[in-house]
Structures are given as C-alpha cells and as structure tokens.
Image: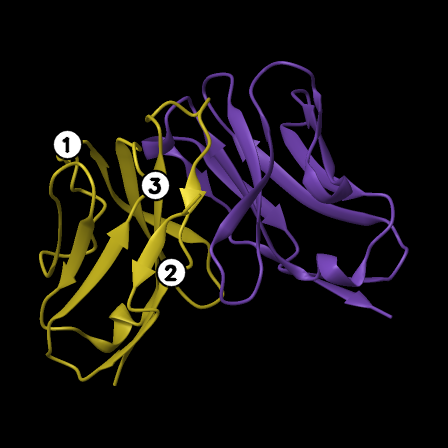
Chain colours: A yellow, B purple
Amino acid sequence: GAGVSQSPSNKVTEKGKDVELRCDPISGHTALYWYRQSLGQGLEFLIYFQGNSAPDKSGLPSDRFSAERTGGSVSTLTIQRTQQEDSAVYLCASSLGLAASYEQFFGPGTRLTVL
Amino acid sequence: AQSVTQLGSHVSVSEGALVLLRCNYSSSVPPYLFWYVQYPNQGLQLLLKYTSAATLVKGINGFEAEFKKSETSFHLTKPSAHMSDAAEYFCAVSEGMFNDMRFGAGTRLTVKP
C-alpha cells in the first residue's frame, strides 16, 4: 500500500519568500508529525496533529512557521519570509495513534534550500 | 525531559565485521527505545524498538539491540556488516507517546570492502 508521501521533494527559494510543504499520510492514520533535519544534526520535533488538532505548537522554531491539517488527512507546513537558517530537510511521519506502541512511518522528506 | 546520546557521529567497519552503534538514554520513566535507519534521500525506517518486553530486541536486516537499564544503554549490533548497511542510524527515546519522542544526532555507518 501507499506510504507517507511529501511534496515537493526539493524546493529552492529565495530569502524572504514563503513556501508550503505538503504531507500525505497513510490512509487511516490519525496522528501526523513534522520534523526538521538540519545538516549533521538529528531530528528536531516541530509539531504533531491528532486528527485536525495541533495541541502544542511550542516546537515550531518561530512565528514564521505554521501548520495545518484538514479532513484528518493532508497537512501543510508553511514557512513565511524564509531565512537561510530554514534550509533543512523537512520530514513528515504518521501513525495510527500517538501511543509509542504503534509504528511511526516516515515520508522521504522535502529538501528546502533558501538562497 | 528524556534525551538520547549517540556516541560517535561516524563509524567505519569492514565488510563482515561486527557493527556496534552506541546509544545512551535519559528518561524519568521506563522508556520506549527505537533505532531507525535512513538511507540517502529517503525517510527513516524503523529497525527495531524496545517496549519493556524482552531486553534483547531483534529487528530487521539482522540487527539487534539490548536494553540495559543499569547502564541506561540501548546499543545496536549486527554480527557481520554488509555493504548495504551503509546508512545513517538514529536512536530515539519516548516516554510513551510519539509526540514526546526525542532523537539522537545520528551515526553514519560506512562499510569498507
């Protein structure tokens, strides 16, 4: 069956522009997560959704970052007025539920480069 | 808060040699522990996870990890490295929910012919 998909796979943008990153989770997965992976670093947790709700947005790096999920399915991560330090791979994951007894499935990521 | 330390950002082994990737964790409650593998330009794939059952956990591709509470460790091993094992490996800890999961910085494994 289809896994988690993300688009675009690569995005090059100029500093100051807005970007939208998309995540399509596995069908039926109620929980969805966004991570950021910077060069040579581990995964930084950004935000999670349970259904359409994001109870905790404190992991977002700044108020330029926002995320939404509609219909309990597709999610978009928006970065406004991009900065060079936003360059990273943005990974999305989904799972049947939030409990760690489930398995979390990752998408291939979107590589964002801000010039 | 829980955290993970991976010792060694880069490990190099010869094909056929033992693979040992080190992970130490910190958690205030019995943890869930995970090892993920990331191949170039791909997302993370679960290798194995510890959920308070058997302390020796067997995963995919011949990998296994042993939970040692006294040492707060969860090291990943494979008896004989294969060229296809070359990848980035991440250890992660959770106190029960994915939204509190924290990842280590990763260890890049290189396998020499």
Q: Left or right: B107 with respect to B16?
A: left
Q: Nearer the viewer, mark 1 or mark 3?
A: 3
Check the image and name the residue furthest to the right: B16
User: Which residue is label 3 attached to?
Assistant: A26
Tell me which amino acid carries mark 3. Ile
* Quadrant containing the N terminus of chain A in the rendered view: top left
Chain assignment, label 2 = A
Label 1 Cα neighbours within 10 Å, binned few <14 / some 14-19 / many ≥20: few
Q: Say what secondary structure mark 1 lies in.
A: loop
Q: Examine the image and state in which quarter residue A79 appears.
A: bottom left
Write the residue at 55% across / 20% down.
B51
Position above or below: A39 against A59: below
Q: Left or right: A61 with respect to B66?
A: left
Residue A35 in sight:
yes
User: Which residue is label 2 attached to?
Assistant: A109
Tell me which amino acid carries mark 1. Pro
Residue B68 locus on image (x, y percent): 69, 24
User: Which residue is label 1 attached to?
Assistant: A55
Chain assignment, label 3 = A
